[in-house]
Image (cartoon, rainbow, N blue to C red):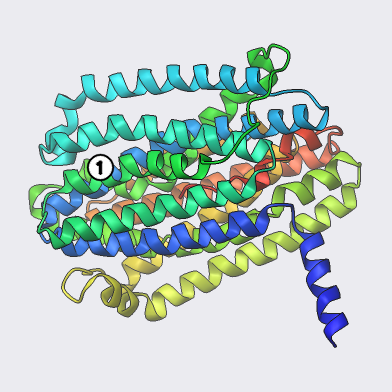
């Protein structure tokens, strides 16, 4: 019996990519601590207008941060792993990526501050500390994502997982301190999000040596010939994923403050299916890439079908659970009087998230077949569908919920059409190096 157990554990470890357990542990910790952080913030910000400002900031920073820098992280990890496998130092590659990241960050930070008078009052309730948090947070996300890419490209998955875990824990501890000190404005809690990447990355890098070995010069093309489409797709994906928060910030009126606050809390409850998706995403791309690169078309299609069954099951169970018990769970987490949404509202939000993770799954398979452009276009079409859906309804809650669901459905259909079209033309060979490290890169949702 003991031998069988050991064999089973061994087979399980062999079946998943290296580093999955370290990164998975970090993901679990950051997911839990982030949810508790959000609950603490809701308790600390009883004013609905202030809480809505914080949620608008959350939407801004998590669209711009991961949207811009997650593709850079992925490409650094892939290219660095390729160099490492050839025994070539990756220092010049990381330096090249750092310069690109610095330019993107500087442009975005300057734009955020320069245009702040246009949106600080409507979105952030005049809280300029949230503007500062946004600018500082962009640099923090750039530093964190570049470091994560460097670590994954060198096979250092333990410190990678540490960054995830410490980032979530640092936000939580800081928010508890602020809450106990009686801080009831959104800015300091936004600063928790902005500063935690610096702390997490600094701690995780302690004792790490040999990450930037000397090597041949690295042109931008070594990062990726498709980096532009990856950036566009990533940004549009984040915009659609956070369209509920962004839509509430744009569409709400003064009288809608309580509805907007309730929707924001419901939005985070509705993110549970994407968190479950991350447990599957970690092993998705390497398996599909391996099958595709060896020309095993039938196995590729079979593996994708099996995965889709799992993902659709997660989406369906999440939606059913939201309609059945979602509201009591939300009231338990955020408070009886602060979670003022109906089962229909929450069910629509979770249904939108469920379809969204189906689109994410198809997007991963499409990227595994070099469909970067098609994936980006599909996300863009989904954003347009959200705008059309939201403009056709007057009720604030329904317009963002129906808009998000419509955008996710349209994206999924366009993505599925593009994937089927590519698969009918055959699976492209030689893509393994493109995907080799992406399985370790969690989606920041």
Residue at 84%, 38% in the rendered image: 427
- Residue lying furthest front in this view? 207
User: Does residue 377 appear anywhere in the picture?
Assistant: no
Considering depth in this image, is 24 or 330 the residue closer to the camera?
Answer: 24
**Residue 167 image position (x, y, % from top left):** 41, 49
Q: Name the residue under label 1.
A: 191
Considering depth in this image, is 296 or 411 the residue closer to the camera?
Answer: 296
Q: Classify 143 as above or below 182.
A: above
Label 1's element? Answer: helix
- Residue lying furthest bottom in this view? 1
User: Does residue 186 appear anywhere in the picture?
Assistant: yes
**Residue 195 image position (x, y, % from top left):** 32, 40
Q: Quadrant of residue 133?
A: top left
Residue at 48%, 47% in the rendered image: 444
Residue at 26%, 54% in the rendered image: 174
Q: Classify 188 as above or below 139.
A: below
């Amino acid at each position: 019996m003991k031998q069988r157990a050991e064999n089973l554990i061994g087979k399980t470890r062999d079946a998943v990519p290296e580093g999955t357990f370290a990164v998975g542990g970090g993901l679990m910790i950051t997911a839990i601590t982030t949810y508790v952080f959000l609950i603490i913030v809701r308790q600390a910000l009883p004013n609905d207008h202030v809480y809505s400002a914080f949620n608008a900031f959350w939407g801004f920073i998590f669209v711009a941060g991961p949207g811009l820098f997650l593709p850079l992280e992925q490409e650094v990890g892939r290219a660095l792993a390729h160099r490492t496998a050839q025994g070539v130092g990756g220092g010049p590659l990381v330096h090249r990526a750092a310069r690109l990241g610095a330019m993107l960050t500087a442009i975005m930070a300057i734009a955020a501050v320069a245009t702040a008078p246009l949106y600080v009052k409507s979105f952030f309730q005049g809280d300029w500390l949230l503007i500062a948090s946004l600018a500082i947070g962009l640099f923090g996300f750039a530093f964190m994502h570049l470091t994560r890419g460097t670590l994954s490209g060198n096979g250092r998955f333990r410190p990678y997982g540490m960054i995830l875990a410490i980032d979530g824990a640092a936000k939580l501890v800081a928010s508890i301190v602020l809450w106990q000190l009686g801080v009831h404005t959104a800015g300091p809690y936004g600063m928790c999000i902005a500063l935690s990447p610096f702390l997490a990355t600094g701690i995780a890098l302690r004792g790490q040596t040999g990450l930037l070995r000397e090597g041949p010069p690295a042109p931008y093309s070594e990062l990726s010939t498709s980096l532009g489409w990856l950036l566009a797709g990533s940004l549009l994906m984040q915009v659609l994923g956070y369209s509920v928060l962004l839509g509430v910030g744009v569409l709400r009126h003064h009288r809608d403050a309580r509805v907007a606050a309730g929707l924001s809390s419901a939005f985070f409850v509705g993110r549970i299916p994407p968190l479950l998706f991350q447990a599957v995403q970690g092993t998705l791309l390497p398996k599909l890439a391996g099958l595709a690169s060896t020309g095993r078309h039938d196995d590729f299609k079979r593996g994708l079908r099996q995965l889709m069954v799992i993902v659709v099951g997660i989406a369906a169970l999440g939606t059913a659970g939201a309609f059945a018990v979602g509201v009591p769970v939300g009231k338990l987490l955020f408070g009886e009087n602060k979670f003022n949404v109906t089962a229909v509202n929450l069910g629509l939000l979770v249904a939108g998230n469920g379809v969204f993770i189906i689109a994410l799954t198809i997007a991963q398979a499409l990227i595994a077949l070099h469909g970067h452009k098609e994936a980006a276009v599909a996300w863009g079409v989904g954003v347009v569908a959200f705008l059309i859906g939201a403009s056709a309804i007057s009720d604030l809650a329904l317009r963002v919920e129906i808009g998000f669901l419509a955008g996710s459905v349209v994206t999924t259909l366009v993505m599925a059409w593009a994937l089927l079209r590519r698969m009918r033309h055959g699976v492209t060979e030689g893509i393994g190096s493109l995907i080799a490290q992406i399985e370790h890169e969690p989606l920041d949702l």
